[in-house]
């Protein structure tokens, strides 16, 4: 008789305690340096992490690299390096990129770390204890770039359905995971927790595929040597995805107190091409280990470059570091989150980036700060009211972030910025003197202080620059209440430079 696997309904109280928020990016393959797609995922996760910190939550933001696998070993060989030396050199580039992009991750995990290997071995032990691992023979197709096993029916014109590249025929002894055992429990999970797979348009794709049936999964390779050896049988190396997915536990020291504090993850964020691994294989592994499941796996869309798919052969791969040398870091961060509805495919173009910089950033936000700080130079003191607070709908902004609608959240913040610009035009403070001027300027300074808090998750260095010019300390959401301005403003350089 098959053992029944109970799936508890995910509740907000269980998975979203106000005291913690655990968000992850996927761990990135080190077969190549970081590109704009990696940056997009990581910036979005950073915005969410910073937002939740402002809410007073204990945030743990994880990113890292997947150092193992055949394509990493191949890239290392082509570079004339050992896999470890090659991985080390590429990981250095990731650290440089995330520092440059102002990423506030709390940890950076690598699959070559001992702390990770220890947890992977424990996961295999638990899966084996559940009777979910057995030895057999694998024969089928394998896509090396995606590190994915494929059936004949999944191929599209004999090629990988995801990346469109050639696949290779594999026949070898392998250990298998009884993934088929978890078809019904997974479908039950999706039914009871409709937000587990997000956004909604991705959810049904996964359900339809699971409903057609799940085959047991080959989880080791004999022909690949760069990876974690299978416990008890060193001629086998663990399939890279079994290794990689376990990082979400190894980084929080499973099963130590840190794990108990942070798990389950609130959001696993990733690009849509790896949703299957996170929405099907990962929860099945956790079910096998009798561990709690994450609350949400969220798949964003693909980035095209001026309407074309990004590829080395086309020469259109965008280096985020070079981009930030040409434009400001915050301009790039703002554009990527503002331009692309999270979950949809999006397009990157420098023309659109420049338009956003010269429009919303320079004309709307930058000029507002410049005008207000110029007016403040005419005042010796300030005394105002909270009349501009009625134009700020923070609950609406908060709901957008909760619903992963970051572009709408930014739009709502700029609605408030526009209202403050309108207030200046209506009050014509350049015509005022004395207390009338002081009242208007106070209201404007207070609005800028609040704007500095709201934009800080999206544009952290701009918020710092604005705070310095206002003479105030960085605030959190508890400081959004109007009537707290006590700074000593001093006009500085324009927040953003117009791009010719």
Image (spheres, helix red, strand yellow):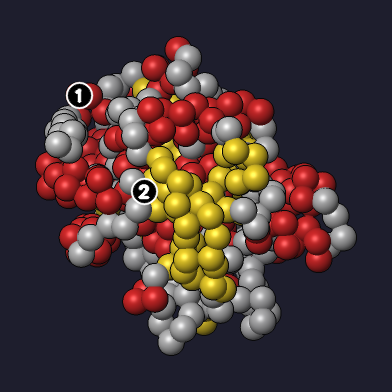
Which element carries disc 1, helix, strand or loop? helix
As displayed, is residue 478 above or below residue 358? above
In the rendered view, does 110 fall on the left or right side of 346?
Answer: right
Which of the image's four quarters has the C terminus?
bottom right
As displayed, is residue 111 above or below residue 223? above
| Picture coordinates of residue 257, whole percent (x, y) | 45, 12
Q: Name the residue under label 2.
A: 281
Quote the CA–CA distance across marks 2 and 1.
25 Å
| Picture coordinates of residue 209, whole percent (x, y) | 25, 63
In the rendered view, does 304 fall on the left or right side of 100?
Answer: left
Residue at (54% x, 42% y) in the render: 243
**Residue 59 occupies which quadrant of the picture?**
top left
| Picture coordinates of residue 399, whole percent (x, y) | 23, 42
**Residue 73 occupies which quadrant of the picture?**
bottom right
Q: Name the residue under label 1.
A: 13
| Picture coordinates of residue 330, whole percent (x, y) | 57, 51
Q: Is residue 26 among the parts visible in the rendering?
A: no
Which of the image's four quarters has the N terminus?
top left
Q: Is disc 2 in contact with disc 1, using a CB cutoff of under 8 Å?
A: no
């Amino acid at each position: 008789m098959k053992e029944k696997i109970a799936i508890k309904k995910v509740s907000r109280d269980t998975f979203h305690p106000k005291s913690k928020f655990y968000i992850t990016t996927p761990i990135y393959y080190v077969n190549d340096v970081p590109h704009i797609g990696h940056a997009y995922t990581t910036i979005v996760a950073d915005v969410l992490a910073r937002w939740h910190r402002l809410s007073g939550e204990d945030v743990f933001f994880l990113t890292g690299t997947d150092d193992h696998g055949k394509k990493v070993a191949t890239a290392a060989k082509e570079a004339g390096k050992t896999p470890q030396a090659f991985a080390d050199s590429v990981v250095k580039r990731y650290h440089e990129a995330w520092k440059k992009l102002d990423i506030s991750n709390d940890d950076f995990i690598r699959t070559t770390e001992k702390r990770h290997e220890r947890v992977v071995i424990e996961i295999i032990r638990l899966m084996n204890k559940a009777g979910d691992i057995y030895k057999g023979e694998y024969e089928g197709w394998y896509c090396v770039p995606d590190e994915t096993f494929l059936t004949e029916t999944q191929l599209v014109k004999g090629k990988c359905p995801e990346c469109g590249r050639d696949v290779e025929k594999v026949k070898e002894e392998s250990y298998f995971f009884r993934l088929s055992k978890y078809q019904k429990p997974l479908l039950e999970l999706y039914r009871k927790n409709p937000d587990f797979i997000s956004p909604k348009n991705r959810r049904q794709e996964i359900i339809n595929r699971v409903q057609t049936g799940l085959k047991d999964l080959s989880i080791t390779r004999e022909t690949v040597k760069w990876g974690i050896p299978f416990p008890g049988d060193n001629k086998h190396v663990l399939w890279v995805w079994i290794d990689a997915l376990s990082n979400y536990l190894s980084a929080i020291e499973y099963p130590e107190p840190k794990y108990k504090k942070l798990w389950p993850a609130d959001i696993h964020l990733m690009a849509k091409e790896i949703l299957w691994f996170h929405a099907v294989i990962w929860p099945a592994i956790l079910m096998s280990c009798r561990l709690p499941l994450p609350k949400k796996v969220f798949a964003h869309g693909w980035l095209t470059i001026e309407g074309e798919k990004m590829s080395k052969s086309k020469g259109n791969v965008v280096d985020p570091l070079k981009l930030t040398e040409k434009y400001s870091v915050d301009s790039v961060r703002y554009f990527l989150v503002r331009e692309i509805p999270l979950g949809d495919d999006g397009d990157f173009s420098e023309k659109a980036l420049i338009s956003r910089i010269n429009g919303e950033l320079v004309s709307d936000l930058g000029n507002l700060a410049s005008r207000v700080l110029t007016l403040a130079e005419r005042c010796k003191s300030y005394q105002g009211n909270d009349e501009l607070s009625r134009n700020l709908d923070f609950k609406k902004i908060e709901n957008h972030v909760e619903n992963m609608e970051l572009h709408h959240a930014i739009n709502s913040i700029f609605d408030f910025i526009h209202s403050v610009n309108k207030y200046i035009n209506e009050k014509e403070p350049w015509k005022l003197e004395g207390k009338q001027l002081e009242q208007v300027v106070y209201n404007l300074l207070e609005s800028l202080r609040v704007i500095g808090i709201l934009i800080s998750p999206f544009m952290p260095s701009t918020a710092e620059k604005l705070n310095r010019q206002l003479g105030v300390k960085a605030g959190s959401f508890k400081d959004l209440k109007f009537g707290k301005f006590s700074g000593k403003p001093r006009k500085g350089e324009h927040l953003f430079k117009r791009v010719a």
